[in-house]
Image: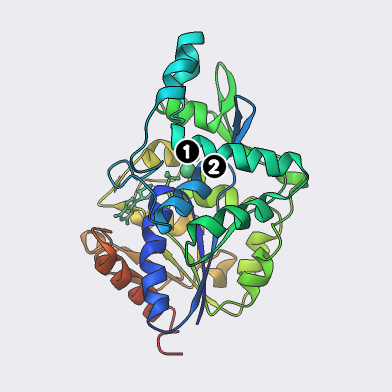
């Protein structure tokens, strides 16, 4: 069974832990298409927060409390940077984490593509899934505010989402192409999952890479989404602010309708919501309510099994 997952960082990584365990029992193989919009250059280093979160989590190297960055992290360099410039410490660059960015930046400077570099980094982390950035091309999510435009990381991490948002922009999207393997994986999948990641700034920028939305629309695989909103609230993070900025209600029904039924020009063949949202209806879509809290791997595997079942691919 071939499973493709569209994923952001912390939520996507947790979900992928369950997908990997589910696939191990089939057997099956998993490709994660990871958001590239968070990628940012700081201190001359290319940093890919969502790719790294997924890589560290699946590789057993993530900090379990924070959900991002390295376990056993120290912050000497961050403190030294702040000593030069009090403003420079807003992004959590840990000492261990820095090694990843140094290696990535060196390989990129030597002419390797982001997906080649990611594969190289994964030789160490062995995530057990194929990790693909949505695109190798320059691509960043920017936030347009009344006072100007800033990188998404600055809005999210530095200002904690407090700056009012006029709109999100996917800089570089028009000229971007999907990374090698992305379209092939979607076209060759049995099941495509839109994980419970932020619909606006994690799944949105993946779909903004020209060709990916069309590949999902055309795949013979079933496409099932899992709601990142439970009982009208994001479980974690600021998806409510992001959804408000694009005029989508922060409800399981709102996000389901935002992705839409494939039969009606949308993306999904089925939509999973939490039991707290039982009774949710989305035009043209089968909706099923199951527990969607990723408390641990067992709960997450059950979510994946429910998604596979809803997609009608179970036991195929
Ligand atoms: P980020 O890039 O680190 O922000 O991570 P993602 O976009 O992949 O995931 C963040 C989203 O995951 C948030 O919008 C949350 O609503 C959602 N999320 C986190 N934990 C859970 C969970 O246990 N269940 C569900 N259904 N959604 C979750
Ligand atoms: Ca992210």
Residue found 46% across the figure and 30% down from its top: 93
Of residues 241 and 49, the one nearer the viewer is 49
Q: Which mark is residue 97?
A: 1
Residue found 56% across the figure and 63% down from its top: 266
Residue found 37% across the figure and 40% down from its top: 240
Residue found 50% across the figure and 47% down from its top: 52
User: Could you say where residue 185 lies in the image, as x and y percent from the top left?
Assistant: 62, 71
Disc 1 and disc 2 in contact, CB within 8 angstroms: yes
Query: Is 31 drawn above or below residue 78 in the view shown?
Result: below
User: Could you say where residue 276 lies in the image, as x and y percent from the top left?
Assistant: 21, 59
At label 2, counting other C-alpha atoms closer than 10 Å, the crowd grade (few under 14, some 14-19, many 20 or more) is some
Of residues 72 and 16, the one nearer the viewer is 72
Query: Is 223 drawn above or below residue 197 in the view shown?
Result: below
What separation in Å lies between label 1 and label 2 (alpha carbons)? 6 Å
Q: Secondary structure at mark 1?
A: helix
At label 1, counting other C-alpha atoms closer than 10 Å, the crowd grade (few under 14, some 14-19, many 20 or more) is many
Quadrant in the picture for residue 149: top right
Q: Which residue is mark 2?
A: 100
């Amino acid at each position: 069974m071939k499973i493709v997952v569209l994923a952001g960082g912390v939520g996507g990584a947790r979900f992928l832990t369950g997908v990997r365990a589910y696939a191990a029992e089939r057997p099956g193989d998993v490709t994660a298409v990871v958001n590239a919009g968070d990628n940012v250059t700081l201190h001359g280093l290319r940093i890919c927060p969502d790719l790294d979160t997924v890589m560290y989590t699946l590789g057993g190297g993530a900090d379990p409390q924070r959900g991002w960055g390295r376990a056993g992290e120290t912050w000497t360099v961050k403190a030294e940077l702040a000593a030069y410039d009090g403003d420079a410490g807003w992004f959590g660059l840990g000492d261990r984490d820095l090694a990843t960015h140094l290696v990535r930046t060196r390989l990129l400077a030597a002419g390797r593509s982001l997906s080649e570099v990611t594969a190289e980094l994964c030789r160490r982390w062995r995530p057990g899934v194929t990790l693909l950035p949505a695109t190798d091309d320059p691509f960043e999510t920017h936030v347009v505010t009344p006072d100007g435009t800033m990188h998404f990381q600055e809005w999210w991490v530095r200002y904690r989402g407090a700056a009012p948002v006029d709109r999100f922009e996917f800089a570089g999207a028009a000229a971007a192409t999907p990374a090698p393997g992305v379209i092939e994986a979607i076209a060759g999948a049995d099941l495509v999952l839109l994980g419970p990641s932020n619909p606006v700034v994690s799944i949105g920028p993946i779909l903004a890479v020209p060709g990916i939305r069309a590949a999902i629309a055309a795949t013979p695989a079933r496409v099932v989404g899992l709601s990142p909103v439970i009982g009208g609230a994001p479980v974690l993070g600021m998806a409510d602010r992001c959804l408000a900025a694009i005029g989508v209600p922060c409800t399981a029904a709102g996000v389901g309708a935002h992705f839409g039924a494939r039969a009606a020009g949308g993306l999904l063949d089925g939509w999973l919501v939490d039991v707290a949202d039982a009774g949710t209806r989305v035009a043209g879509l089968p909706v099923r309510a199951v527990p969607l809290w990723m408390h641990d791997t067992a709960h997450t595997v059950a979510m994946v099994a429910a998604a596979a079942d809803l997609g009608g691919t179970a036991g195929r």
